[in-house]
Amino acid sequence: MGFPRHRSARPGRSAGRPPAPPLTIRAGTVRDTRTIYAMLKGLAGYERLLGRFRSSVERVRRDGFGARRYFRTLICRLGPRPVGVAVYFFTYSTFEARPTLYVEDVFVWPRDRGRGAGGALLAELARIAVRKGCARMEWTVLDWNAPAIRFYERLGTIMRKEWVLARLTGAPLRRLAHTRSGAKRRNG
Ligand SMILES: CC(C)(COP(=O)(O)OP(=O)(O)OC[C@H]1O[C@@H](n2cnc3c(N)ncnc32)[C@H](O)[C@@H]1OP(=O)(O)O)[C@@H](O)C(=O)NCCC(=O)NCCS
């Protein structure tokens, strides 16, 4: 499935209304900080994870646009209005010996879904992955998020159920960090 870089929102779904403005995508800038924050909060709400959402406008500014940038963003607009966001960063596959593009988040505001914004964001991520010589792009999706899984599968995405996400956080993480092992760390 191919999504052109710029295209009009899908015809047919707007019958009787004036023609939809074009979809455009560009890299997020520090001026998009509040928009990105609002959309990430929207995604946390959709994923029923608002209770664990610790982000803030300041964190998005610092970690996305500060001295040490941990993630990059794409903003999708419908005319002048931001309707969707993708957050990604680069990881590395030692087996493929190439970088990989990790998609942390994709989100489109509910009223703007089904007009091609999500597909256009993923297509732009694919173009970046290919341009940067990545072995693959990948991400996780909650197992109950059937509409998103169907959407990804239609793009040719494979769900790798044999890989289980391993996560160490909170007290166990701190406990391990403070464990005295036999090994002494040396620099160099
Ligand atoms: C998944 C998502 C990014 C797709 O964006 P979008 O702009 O609706 O995508 P497109 O218009 O390019 O494609 C729409 C397709 O997505 C599917 N879709 C997936 N999740 C959907 C949702 N929650 N609501 C509406 N459509 C959804 C539709 O079935 C539609 O398929 P169709 O083209 O055959 O009708 C968007 O629906 C979204 O933000 N969902 C909630 C958050 C989410 O699930 N994010 C991904 C987490 S891994």
Image (cartoon, rainbow, N blue to C red):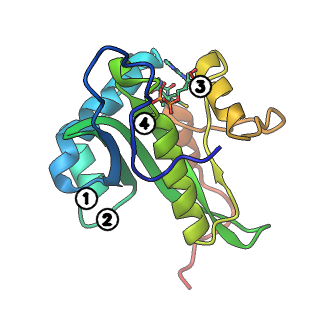
Q: Mark 3 points at which residue?
A: 148
Task: State yes or no: discs 3 and 1 in contact (Cβ < 8 Å).
Answer: no
Check the picture and name the quadrant holding the N terminus.
top right
Q: Residue 117 carries which label?
A: 4
Ligand 1 within 8 Å of disc 3? The answer is yes
Relative to 15, 148 lies left or right: right
Task: State yes or no: discs 4 and 1 in contact (Cβ < 8 Å).
Answer: no
**Mark 4 or mark 2, whichever is nearer to me:** 4
Q: Mark 1 points at which residue?
A: 65
**Mark 3 or mark 1, whichever is nearer to me:** 3
Q: Which of marks 4 and 3 is nearer the N terminus?
A: 4
Q: Is label 3 in a helix, a strand or a loop?
A: helix
Q: Earlier in the sequence, mark 4 or mark 2?
A: 2
Report the Cα–Cα distance between label 3 and label 1.
28 Å
Amino acid type, mark 4? Ala
Spot the residue most to the bottom: 188
**Mark 4 or mark 1, whichever is nearer to me:** 4
Report the Cα–Cα distance between label 4 and label 1.
23 Å
